[in-house]
Amino acid sequence: GTFFEGGIRTPFFVRWPARIAAGQRISEPAHFIDVLPTLAAAAGAPLPSGRVIDGINLLPFATAHTPPIKRTLFWRSGSYEAVRDGDWKLQVSRNPPRIWLFNLAADRPERNDLSKTRPEIVAQLRVELGAHDRQIAKPLWPALLEEPIRIDVPADTPWKPGQEYVYWPN
């Protein structure tokens, strides 16, 4: 339930025997926003006009062995957001106020927060988050409630003092 790797790193499987060879692997991350452009391309349908479509069509990478493109990925839910640029990933929570920075190449489970030791990377990624925030549409309606979600702890586990959490809107 968070933007930590335990909450967002999941396999993305596609099966299309007529177009995609079995065992294909894409090394770069796919994002849920890629589903619409990929399905539209598979169906031969145009993407909606009049709006920015953040995702990309993954078919060229799965069907033609085209190397995936390097791109910056963003996540946002209420006052909690994250950006991944290459191996660097920054997470920002405004409630409670907290920043985490991780180098995913060296620390995929996100156990070593580098936000205090790499302020230049934090600043760079915060600029990217700000630019992205200015481009996206505002929510059409506010969340009805926000609940604390502990980081990498199952929801049914009893709370312990000092556990880190973010507020997740619903």
Image (cartoon, rainbow, N blue to C red):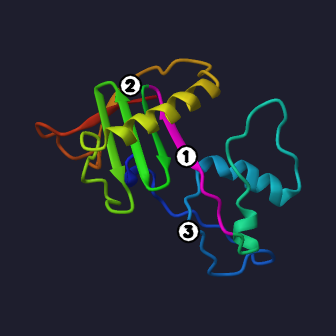
Disc nearest the viewer among 2 and 3: 3
**Disc 3, SS:** loop
> x, y percentage for residue 153?
26, 48
Query: Looking at the image, can residue 136 be seen?
Result: no
Q: How far is disc 1 from disc 2 in space, using C-alphas?
A: 24 Å
Q: Amino acid at mark 2?
A: Glu
Q: Extreme left residue here?
A: 161
Categorize mark 2 by other alpha carbons within 10 Å: few (<14), some (14-19), many (20+): some
Mark 2 lies on residue: 146
- Which residues fall within the magenta stretch? 67-78
> x, y percentage for residue 76?
50, 34
**Disc 2, SS:** strand
Left/right of residue 157 with respect to residue 148 in the rendered view: left
Query: Considering only vertical position in the picture, is 169 above or below 32?
Result: above
Q: Is residue 73 magenta?
A: yes
Mark 1 lies on residue: 73
> x, y percentage for residue 57?
74, 56
Disc nearest the viewer among 1 and 2: 1
Q: How far is disc 3 from disc 1 in space, using C-alphas?
A: 15 Å
Q: Which mark is residue 128?
A: none
Residue drawn 18% across and 40% down? 163
Q: Amino acid at mark 1?
A: Leu
Between 76 and 133, the residue placed more toward the observer is: 133
Query: Looking at the image, can residue 5 be seen?
Result: yes
Q: Amino acid at mark 3?
A: Ser
Query: Considering only vertical position in the picture, is 45 above or below 27?
Result: above
Of label 3 and label 1, which has the lower sequence position?
A: 3
Quarter of the view holding residue 137: top right
- Image quadrant where one finds the N terminus: top left
Numbered-mark total: 3
Of label 1 and label 2, which has the lower sequence position?
A: 1
